Image: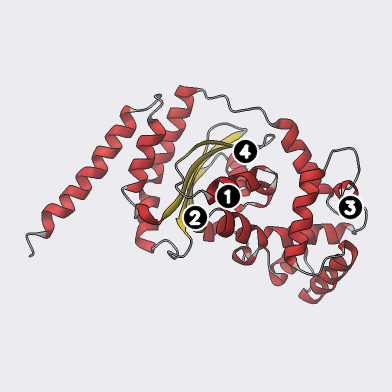
Amino acid sequence: MDKKRVPTSITKREKVLEHEALVIGALGNQNFYDELSCLMFSFLDKPDVSRFALCHLTRDQRPQFVYDVSPSPRVKSGFALFLEGAYLLDPVYRYALDCIENGKSGFFPLKEIAPDEFLNSEFYKRYYLAEGGVEDNVDFVVAISSNSALAISIGKLAGSGPYPEEVLLRLKEISPVVNALLKKHWEKGKADPEETTELHRLFKQAYDRFGVSVLTEREQELVHLMLLGYSQVAAADILGVKPGTVKMHRKNIYTKLEVSTHAELFALFLDALKFYDGKVDDPLKNL
């Protein structure tokens, strides 16, 4: 037995316990999220972390970033893109709504909740990679009421590879403690995020009505699946049709919307979100 390795192991465990004690002691105080981030970093290789953010999500409002310690300046522009309506395509946001619906909490690596072709989607390339500098992402999600949830997102720096399985296992093991502390702190603080109901309503309408004046109902359904990051095969399975039918619909969609690539479709969607005023049946009419 190598006696020199024993103190190192004990020291690391002692540091984790120390961080846990500090988080518990900070419940209801302003330094709670600082202490919580330190606890999370004790399980991670901090130089590889490009984003640590806490977001408050509800059914009827735009998401609100409550806290972030993201060292990369690109993350700020990524947040801006997210809050301009692109969050409607985010698998974490959509999964958090499911947690609210079912009153559940947990730890969710991005790869477990994202559509099958999400890593090839324009949203992932723009929000996660280009703007956020994030290659992989994990989230702690806790439903705090029948209408809202909290989500901690920890992004791994682009180019550093995905999270190792042993790290995912350690984070999953501590998730019940993290989520319980999050909920308790929120109840103590009774935070009141900025009211953004009207913005969310417009973004959601723009998403729902995108292309309604030129696309069929089935083509609209497919556009949503394409934007979310579903492959042709997965989309066909969801819609209950053959992949060849999806391919035909996609060709018609591109023709009607006057785009030729997924990147152009995504850019058109972002413009529709940006300029939609809620006064027309199709946000494309505002362009």
* Pointer 2 residue: 137
Marks 2 and 1, how far apart at CA: 10 Å
Say what secondary structure mark 2 lies in: strand
Q: Are marks 4 and 1 in contact (CB under 8 Å)?
A: no
How crowded is the residue under tag 1: few (<14 C-alpha within 10 Å), some, or many (20+)? many
Q: Is residue 263 above or below residue 7?
A: below
How crowded is the residue under tag 2: few (<14 C-alpha within 10 Å), some, or many (20+)? many
In-image side of 162 versus 62 (left or right): left
Disc on the earlier residue, 2 or 3: 2
Q: Which mark is residue 63?
A: 4
Number of marks in picture: 4
Marks 1 and 3, how far apart at CA: 26 Å
Q: Amino acid at mark 2?
A: Asn
Q: Amino acid at mark 4?
A: Pro
Marks 3 and 4, how far apart at CA: 26 Å
In-image side of 124 versus 49 (left or right): right
Report the residue at 71% width, 31% height from top.
Answer: 197
Marks 4 and 2, how far apart at CA: 18 Å
Marks 4 and 1, how far apart at CA: 11 Å
Disc on the earlier residue, 4 or 1: 4
Disc on the earlier residue, 2 or 1: 1
* Pointer 3 residue: 212
Image position, residue 124 (x, y; %): 61, 59
Marks 2 and 3, how far apart at CA: 33 Å
Report the residue at 84% width, 48% height from top.
Answer: 209
Disc on the earlier residue, 4 or 2: 4
Disc on the earlier residue, 1 or 3: 1
Q: Is residue 118 above or below residue 204?
A: below
